[in-house]
Image (cartoon, coloured by chain):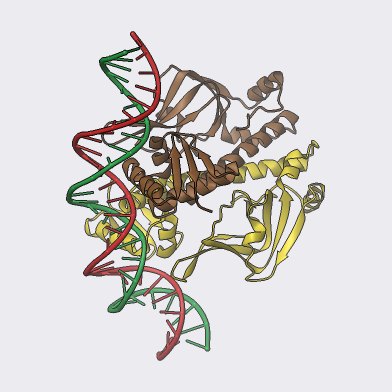
Chain colours: A yellow, B brown, C red, D green
Amino acid sequence: MKNPFDNISKKNKEKLLKNLKSHTVNYKNNTNITEIITDKNEIGIIVSGYLQIVKNNYNGSSNVIDTLQENDAFSSSTFYIDDDYEIIAKEDVNIIIIDYTELINYNENDKVYNQFIKNLFIILNEKLTDKNERIEILTKKTIRNKLLEYFKIMSKKNGSKYIYLPFNFINLADYLAIDRSAMSRELKFLKDEGFIEIKGKRITLLYR
Amino acid sequence: MKNPFDNISKKNKEKLLKNLKSHTVNYKNNTNITEIITDKNEIGIIVSGYLQIVKNNYNGSSNVIDTLQENDAFSSSTFYIDDDYEIIAKEDVNIIIIDYTELINYNENDKVYNQFIKNLFIILNEKLTDKNERIEILTKKTIRNKLLEYFKIMSKKNGSKYIYLPFNFINLADYLAIDRSAMSRELKFLKDEGFIEIKGKRITLLYR
DNA sequence: TCTAAAATGTTGCAAATGCAACATTGTTAT
DNA sequence: ATAACAATGTTGCATTTGCAACATTTTAGA
């Protein structure tokens, strides 16, 4: 993922942030910052520490479905979070906050600013690709078709019949929005029918 | 939706497009341009005419799930299209094509160019919001919860308990990625249980 | 190395859903 | 006005899925 301050010197970065009237916020490790972050028209950029998006399940268990690392940028308004999710600050996180309206209405023809917007444009484009892929998967109606679509996309990315899962099966099930045990069952069927082979996090596609 | 050429004069637009080595393509009414459009690293902007994203169902029927109008911008690589979908040109469509790499690597500190990137940034941000909303809905596991999440989002947008469906029920079912008749059944249950009222395309939320 | 916790695998069962088929209502062009 | 078509409503049924509960395997920490 691209860094929002690519091609911007440290000095220029400070100046820009000042011009954009940005401010930084700090949260201690394990603070729940869901309320503070969402539903504002702001851009956030993580300076240090990280954020976890945690999903709370009905039965009391919970699992991390996403992690926002250093230099990750996020738009708090597009950060769709409902009652089942929480955003947790990790390692005394530091976040730069920029008001979206301020960002858009800043009208100097400032080289640094323009570079910054361009970087954000590239980042959003990457994010949009990811979201589109996920939607393509989620719109499949059966677990099998969701899995196959996921495999197709991953294999295309790798240019290979091997897929290396970027997360564990619990998180894969969350990504596909299906029940983990039902997914496990379907994976077994796919194995039995000779479509795939699974070794740890490596899946081999045995068809076409 | 924002126009990608907002705050750019006609003259400057022409100059910019030339600098970016863009070209235009034309397709006659009802041409299937799926192959031509997808899987390229390009930005497209519709000048005249429009595009329809058509979904073909297994049983031979098909329906329009999205329409891209004049001034709509799209990134052909993020335009996720698989075998079930087609992109159809309507009304002898005219599209400006800009190579993405060219766009990103154009390094003049050109006021018009910077404005253009900023406009595209804003457009992507809007699109990202929409995609996030849809993902939030699609990750709900039951038809009922998908509907309720959709209602919640729409009602929040309107700031009202009234929802005016922006499409018909066939397309709503497609948007929610559920079977239309099953959706119809669930809507009936919601009506019977006193949660909602439906009059044509207006849905009234009777809870909270 | 051993142990506790986490992840993964398995299965029965009830509930939800897709699909098909058809009825009813609404829309549009002539 | 009415015919043809499109959209919406309805229902039975087989399939798929979520959920629960538990077994087995893997991982990580002491």
Q: Is residue B162 visible?
A: yes
Residue pictured at 44% horizontal, 48% vertical: B147
| Quadrant (top left/top right/bottom left/bottom right) for the N terminus of chain B | top right
Quarter of the image for residue B53 reads: top left
Horizontal arrangement in the rendering, residue A63 relative to residue B170 (left or right): right
State whether residue A135 is above or below residue D5. below
Q: Could you say where residue B127 lies in the image, as x and y percent from the top left?
A: 56, 40
State whether residue A101 is above or below residue B35. below
Q: Could you say where residue B50 lies in the image, as x and y percent from the top left?
A: 49, 23
Quarter of the image for residue B9 reads: top right
Q: Could you say where residue A125 lies in the image, as x and y percent from the top left?
A: 57, 42
| Quadrant (top left/top right/bottom left/bottom right) for the C terminus of chain B | bottom right
Residue pictured at 71% horizontal, 25% vertical: B8
Q: Is residue A70 visible?
A: no
Q: Nearer the viewer, residue A177 or B197?
A: B197
Residue pictured at 57% horizontal, 35% vertical: B100
Q: Nearer the viewer, residue D27 or A56?
A: A56
